[in-house]
Image: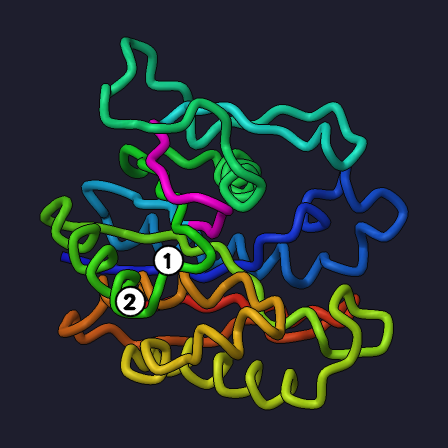
Amino acid sequence: MLVAAAVCPAPPLLVPEVAAGAAAELDDARTACSDALAVLAAARPDLLVVVGAAAEGGGYDQGTPGGFAGFGVDLTVTLGPDPGGPPSGEATGTVLPPSLAVAGWLLGQARWAAAPVAGVAVAEDLPAGGCGLLGADLGRSADRVAMLVMGDGSACRTLKAPGYLDERAAAFDAAAGRALGAADTGALAALDPVLAAELLAAGRAPWQVLAGAAEGAGLDGRLLYEDAPYGVGYFVAAWS
């Protein structure tokens, strides 16, 4: 059963070494992420499931490496501390996609040791119903499950945004922010996958996985951070 969740943005710029001279611009987001991870640890989970979007879905063992060489930085992270021992045999990936690599960095900063970690990449184009079913399965993967959900809102908030300015982006992000802050699983499940894709909102699928996991869990939500630096909607929320 899902007992807690943290929602964090997934841009590699969250990692100071990647952001370089612009690192201070996301200090508040990093602090909020740290606070959200503390909520997960306080929930005393048996398992932490880390969910992020990727081109293809897949599973990743604790200790799987990832890095930021593609962004010009020689920095390697792992998905939680390396547990040692042989692979689980259930993982399908051996190198973390960027969203899970950012999660690995966050877990390293938090010195996560509260529970074993499993990583799940959800395909960016997975339909809402499939996301909900995946989330429901993940929510049943241990007696006390915590979830770290990595995902961004629209990337079309300004003229200089990665997707240029789209007048629909602010309303999409406002709806997503309300749902994340209220732990409103119905509103998250209702986000339009087609609109999300047009707005380059990579968080849509992971958020809908969270909605499936949290259905019926009775969690309360708090929105710890909301902003759109670089024209991209970033949110941090804690559910418990």
Instruction: Name which residue type carries label 1.
Output: Val
Nearest the viewer among 120 and 115 is 120
- Reading the image, the residue beneath label 1 is 39
Q: Position of residue 100 (x, y in %)?
A: 49, 41
> Where is residue 221, by image quadrant?
bottom left
How many other residues sit within 10 Å of disc 2, few (<14), some (14-19) or many (≥20)?
some
Main SS class of the magenta portion in the image: strand
Q: Position of residue 189 (x, y in %)?
A: 32, 76
Nearest the viewer among 132 and 8 is 132
Residue 91 relative to residue 29: left or right? left
The relative height of residue 2 versus residue 220 in the rendered view (above or below) is above
How many other residues sit within 10 Å of disc 1, few (<14), some (14-19) or many (≥20)?
some
Magenta residues, start to end: 52-61
Q: Residue at x 19, y 72 (%)?
A: 215
- Colour setup of the view: rainbow
Q: Earlier in the sequence, mark 1 or mark 2?
A: 1
Q: Position of residue 98 (x, y in %)?
A: 58, 41
- Reading the image, the residue beneath label 2 is 240
* Marks 1 and 2 in Cβ contact (< 8 Å): yes
Element at badge 2?
A: loop
Q: Residue at x 37, y 59 (%)?
A: 126
The relative height of residue 221 versus residue 60 in the rendered view (above or below) is below
Task: Give the spatial CA distance, label 1 vs label 2.
Answer: 7 Å
Nearest the viewer among 197 and 170 is 197
Q: Position of residue 235 (x, y in %)?
A: 56, 69
Residue 230 relative to residue 77: left or right? right
Element at badge 1?
A: helix
Residue 103 relative to residue 238: left or right? right
Looking at the rendering, in which quadrant would you find the N terminus? bottom left
Answer whether residue 58 is magenta in the image: yes
